[in-house]
Image (spheres, rainbow, N blue to C red):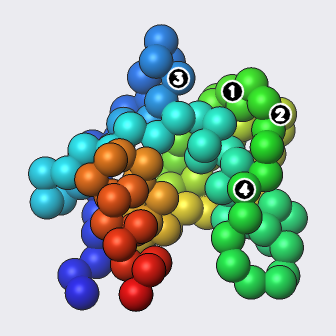
Amino acid sequence: MEPHFPVEINHIRQKGVVRITWHDGHIGEYPREYLRGYCPCAMCQGHEGGVKFVDVPDAGLAEITPVGNYAIQFRWDDGHSTGIYTFDYLRSLCPCPLCSGWKSESETR
């Protein structure tokens, strides 16, 4: 499987989303609360395995920073900034109908 990487990342404040245009032309719009809720850091996810959603209402996004050539890091208005979101992880989180349908089909196998 080919690794995923973004060609453009934009925080669209008025819509409350981060829009990522991927190398294959796919565009995903990720609500801020969604990204904050799926923060991959150990404090948010724990050590049990699996991915869980942590509800953080009114998550404000202060900054997006690249991490090498494999990830980005968000700094949130609540001061949280320890999650490193790899590009593959972000692509797996894509909430668009096309990706959500693909996830549903693959989860039933």
The image quadrant where one finds the C terminus is bottom left
Question: At which x and y percent is residue 6?
Answer: 29, 55
Q: Nearer the viewer, mark 3 or mark 1?
A: 3
Q: Which residue is mark 3?
A: 16
Q: Which residue is mark 4?
A: 53
Is 96 left or right of 64, judged from the image as shown?
Answer: left
* Disc 4 to disc 3, C-alpha distance: 18 Å
Q: Residues within 10 Å of mark 3 (few under 14, many from 20)?
A: some
Q: Nearer the viewer, mark 4 or mark 1?
A: 4
Among the two numbered marks 4 and 2 on one chain, the one whose residue lies closer to the N terminus: 4
Q: For the residue marked with disc 1, what is the amino acid? A: Gly
* Disc 4 to disc 1, C-alpha distance: 17 Å
Question: At which x and y percent is residue 22?
Answer: 24, 54
Q: For the residue marked with disc 2, what is the amino acid? A: Asp
* Disc 2 to disc 3, C-alpha distance: 16 Å
Q: Which residue is mark 1?
A: 60
* Disc 3 to disc 1, C-alpha distance: 8 Å
Residue that appears at 27% across and 53% down: 98
Q: Quadrant of residue 82?
A: bottom right
- Asked if the residue at tag 2 contacts the one at tag 4, i.e. Cβ–Cβ closer than 8 Å, the answer is no
Q: Which residue is mark 2?
A: 78
